[in-house]
Amino acid sequence: MKFYGVEVEERQELGSYTLLKYPWTDGPVEPGQFVMARAAGYPATLDPFLARPFSFYDYDGRMASLLFEVRGRGTMLLDLASTIEVTAPLGKGFRIEPRLGRAALLGGGIGVVPLKILRRRLNAMDVPHDVFLGFADARPAAVAREFPGAGVATMDGSAGTHGTVLDATDSLEVYGAVYACGPNPMLAAVKRAARENGLCQLSVEERMGCGNGSCNGCVVPVRGGGYIRSCIEGPVFHSDVLAW
Amino acid sequence: MKFYGVEVEERQELGSYTLLKYPWTDGPVEPGQFVMARAAGYPATLDPFLARPFSFYDYDGRMASLLFEVRGRGTMLLDLASTIEVTAPLGKGFRIEPRLGRAALLGGGIGVVPLKILRRRLNAMDVPHDVFLGFADARPAAVAREFPGAGVATMDGSAGTHGTVLDATDSLEVYGAVYACGPNPMLAAVKRAARENGLCQLSVEERMGCGNGSCNGCVVPVRGGGYIRSCIEGPVFHSDVLAW
Amino acid sequence: MVVRDQKAGVDLAVELCGLPLRTPLIPASGTLSREALGEVEGVYGAMLPKTTTPATRAGNPPPRIAETPAGMVNSIGLQNPGVHGFLKGLDAFDLGIPIFVSVAGDTVAEFALLCEILAGDDRVSAVELNLSCPNVECGGLVFCAGPASVEQVVAACRAAVPGKPILVKLTNEGVVENARAAESAGADGLTVINTIPALTLDARARKVLVRGGLSGPAIKPVALRAVYDVSGVVNVPVIGSGGVVSGTDVAEFMLAGATAVQVGTASFVRDPHEILDEFASYLKESGLGAAELSGALRSVPP
Amino acid sequence: MVVRDQKAGVDLAVELCGLPLRTPLIPASGTLSREALGEVEGVYGAMLPKTTTPATRAGNPPPRIAETPAGMVNSIGLQNPGVHGFLKGLDAFDLGIPIFVSVAGDTVAEFALLCEILAGDDRVSAVELNLSCPNVECGGLVFCAGPASVEQVVAACRAAVPGKPILVKLTNEGVVENARAAESAGADGLTVINTIPALTLDARARKVLVRGGLSGPAIKPVALRAVYDVSGVVNVPVIGSGGVVSGTDVAEFMLAGATAVQVGTASFVRDPHEILDEFASYLKESGLGAAELSGALRSVPP
Ligand SMILES: Cc1cc2nc3c(=O)[nH]c(=O)nc-3n(C[C@H](O)[C@H](O)[C@H](O)COP(=O)(O)OP(=O)(O)OC[C@H]3O[C@@H](n4cnc5c(N)ncnc54)[C@H](O)[C@@H]3O)c2cc1C
Ligand SMILES: Cc1cc2nc3c(=O)[nH]c(=O)nc-3n(C[C@H](O)[C@H](O)[C@H](O)COP(=O)(O)OP(=O)(O)OC[C@H]3O[C@@H](n4cnc5c(N)ncnc54)[C@H](O)[C@@H]3O)c2cc1C
Ligand SMILES: Cc1cc2nc3c(=O)[nH]c(=O)nc-3n(C[C@H](O)[C@H](O)[C@H](O)COP(=O)(O)O)c2cc1C
Ligand SMILES: Cc1cc2nc3c(=O)[nH]c(=O)nc-3n(C[C@H](O)[C@H](O)[C@H](O)COP(=O)(O)O)c2cc1C
Ligand code: FES
Ligand code: FES
């Protein structure tokens, strides 16, 4: 896999997340696409060995931004790095179906990330939509200010509705399309709640080894049996495809 | 082994070497003593795994300085780091014998490092001495300006005498004491050249795993058979001790 | 670190089992997908897709991978469409270089069957036997658990595909004995080593994460030792595999005795062009051609 | 990363072969010198100096060590003053915790002789047999090359030191079979694993650097698998060894089935107090005492 060394041009805290901007002019970014990224230093240091997948948070034709949560050592090092290494945009993002009417966008925790570009696209196409965001507590929920008008829920009730992101919605059945990103248990719940909808697309989060289809590490179970790779066939899947 | 995180307070190029200063107030430093050092980041990154040994170049009671040559990835990362991790001073340095008369100080390449503190000590004790430095070529030889009056030799003749450090000396036999640091083949040559001298001390360079005597990795062969550890019994040895 | 255009005037070609290879690099089976082929143009001397089996295998449920210090553990479970589906898609792997096919079966008969099928396919230049899979006739011990079963499966495959080179891929455990057995049963080459059995846990969740095989730079010194020891006792060529990340690593494997070298996990994190470029710089500096490097140590330890 | 003073209210004690240990940490043999003892006060549950042999051993000529990705390879060659010199210096290792002594011989008789000598020394609480050394009576194969020689040497030692626990230290290759053999021959505990055979080369100089054993975090997933598999088939306690760097690693080894855990190479690069402190924080968070952790996985994979 080819990595490009890029300078971090801007870094800022958004609630408990880190926003990081780097120059990227090599073509457009679809909502839901991701990059593999790591702190530079390789191969002088061979640990951590793998890059990590991150959805695009924003892209303006000149700068790409990632928004991430520090979880383990990969994100810890990324949070400190002044130079990072990234791949070209990867995977299949959300396919927008403008004819299906009002859309619901659901983000769970750091799963808000791909919703920003998605929302801009929906706006550009005049597709009416509502955004619902769920968080553990008020700290990460601070990122909701980037999504004006969004319904917010927190698990501890410290901001917005007390409960999950689904508790912030009335019913998903009124929507012609549902686009969701978040931890897999949340996605499974969204899939159940959106059962009757025409279109429900989920951006899944699996561990990735390569990001380019080579390792077969990132699979999700599919209806009818077997597994498919979330880095190539996804990370966004029509909910019908997934055997969840 | 206990490591202390310290900020790099000053970094500067000296010829082809890097000079790096960090705050150190925990006690005195003997000429020839060393520290184990590495770029901070551990344990978020576990590679390179081992720290590297570096002689003290200077110490003023408030700041310690290292002077090093970038060879592999350990020194490459150290060269970039803003925070480093170091141990307390380790090993046995040069034992100064002021009664032996005029002293010769010989440094080969980066082996100049321990001679700076050593020379200051000799000056303080009014011990007459001459300094001879050998380098591959003129670039590293630039460090010789830190040793005013030193005789200089380069292997390619691009600065000073053409040849090894021994070619910069007339004869070592006129000296009551010889103190040398450099690559092991140079030290063996110094030992031969100084055969008749009362005192010849050599600071050896062996690969080190721990620096505190635990791994038995850093040994040198001793006269009479067997090996002793250069991190505990050395790195400075009386030349008679070594089976070279 | 990246040195471009270092290939001019350097002889990268090697010969492996009578096949001329443009470069000594081969993708390790299971680490290069059809989708990534566009990225590796010009790097490899032969193509080697993921192991195929007689029938479709769905593979293991996730999580299938976990990162470890300077490496990773995987438990993919040989997910593949089965040999017939595999062969239907094989044309996609034609980059104008020899194609090697890796096979695995549950029984000796399945291995032989796969070899028979490949024997009749002109696109296939050589067969690699992945012996790190369980032998259901031996209580699930892997085929390379001991020389007896290695000999048995290699002999059966030898008979089934008389016209193509057979490469036998071995795991580290018992590698020297197994290499001897494979050679005496008719192997034309040995791939050394496959991943090393390993386990990862999530301490916080108090559960096993992945039980599988360790790959990546962490295992390089173990693989180098295996290549060195095996190439000292067999006469067939050895293909090094395990932790290759840089051109220097390629050189180390060849100096240890390998004729060709596989790049696996590293291709997830580096552009393999960089590895080839670094290797070319190494050759340039050393003044040797790739074919002269194998076993060319200047001194051998006691 | 360092969490100090996390030990209050946490129960670090474990019992190993009837011996109460203050903490489950033990220095791995050959990785803690007399000179460094001052730095480890309060960390360990037992002391375990470098392997001793019947006669003085000078050890191997340098280079003895080489760094590898997330690890190192060593070939020290069991440098030690011989058992009599060793015992003369043993008092220095008295930190008020049980002292285990690691022994190695060239023959079964030498192992038994060492055990007899230690049987009469009250300072020695347990004996660890380092079976990763060559058996000169078996063509230089290591003692743990197979269950037969493991059983033979353990049985002889068992007879020679009836009154003290015997811990048998095994290498990764064949570890499950060898563990069974050691147990049936009377081992009271098993240390799993020793370093993994490996090799490093200097490509530029075109020479072998160090042929020895790989240790450090690189081998952790291999060691975890060995501990998990062995503790599933034996009834005696298992002591984990291999790549422990952090308190979480200690927890992982215990969850995998270890009763105690050795810290080796990591002690060269970290203050082991930090490892103990991190382990104490883990226990605090998990609400468990150290003695409850062994094998306490919530779910077991298929
Ligand atoms: C397509 C895709 C897009 C993503 N986009 C974003 C994003 O925009 N922002 C963001 O912050 N994160 C995103 N993630 C998740 C991100 O990749 C992980 O948080 C990251 O890999 C953790 O790396 P680490 O080294 O910090 O943690 P590690 O040390 O690898 O692990 C720390 C913890 O995180 C868990 N973890 C690690 N990887 C994953 C994973 N893939 N899925 C679930 N849990 C994991 C581990 O179990 C462990 O508990 C995305 C993941 C995918 C697959
Ligand atoms: C007591 C002592 C004091 C030292 N003081 C200094 C000093 O003041 N300044 C300085 O620049 N260097 C000093 N060195 C040498 C320094 O430790 C090595 O240059 C360093 O370890 C190289 O690390 P690396 O990661 O950059 O190289 P690596 O990647 O480890 O190796 C790069 C190259 O350096 C060689 N190498 C690595 N370690 C050693 C070693 N210990 N001896 C010889 N060759 C080695 C390798 O063979 C390889 O060719 C000292 C060494 C010792 C033992
Ligand atoms: C994700 C993954 C999948 C693999 N699949 C296979 C496979 O299908 N068949 C096989 O023989 N080896 C397989 N391997 C092993 C590699 O081919 C290679 O031998 C091993 O990973 C060591 O080399 P490396 O460290 O360069 O990766 C796989 C390795 C990885 C990491
Ligand atoms: C420098 C060094 C010396 C060692 N010496 C011995 C020894 O004398 N006896 C022994 O049983 N194991 C010895 N070992 C192996 C360790 O005890 C330990 O089992 C192994 O290194 C794996 O653990 P680690 O990864 O925590 O180091 C040595 C290891 C190293 C690195
Ligand atoms: S991450 Fe490797 S196949 Fe998807
Ligand atoms: S460096 Fe470990 S004993 Fe000297």
Image (tube, coloured by chain):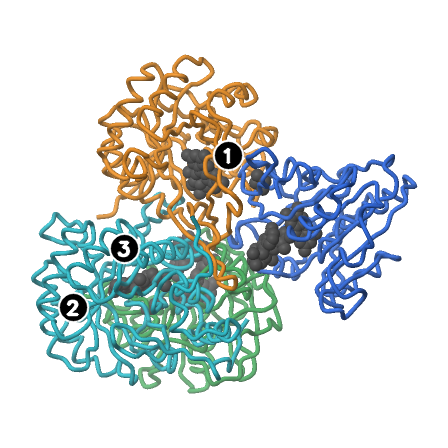
Chain colours: A blue, B green, C orange, D cyan
| Image point (57%, 43%), residue name | A218
Q: Residues within 10 Å of mark 2 (few under 14, many from 20)?
A: few
Kindly identify which residue carries mark 3: D171
**Cα distance in 3D space between marks 3 and 2:** 35 Å
Instruction: Classify 10 Å Cα crowding around label 3: few (below 14), some (14-19), many (20 and above).
Output: many
In what element is the residue under mark 3? Answer: loop
Q: Amino acid at mark 1?
A: Ala
Mark 3–mark 1 distance (CA, rounded to whole Å): 35 Å
Spatial separation of the CA atoms under disc 2 and disc 1? 66 Å
Residue under label 2: B224
Give the quarter of the image for residue B126.
Answer: bottom left
The chain identifier of the residue carrying mark 2 reads B
Circle 2 — which element?
loop
Q: Are marks 2 and 1 on the same chain?
A: no
Q: Amino acid at mark 3?
A: Thr
Query: Residue C221, position in %: x, y?
Result: 37, 48
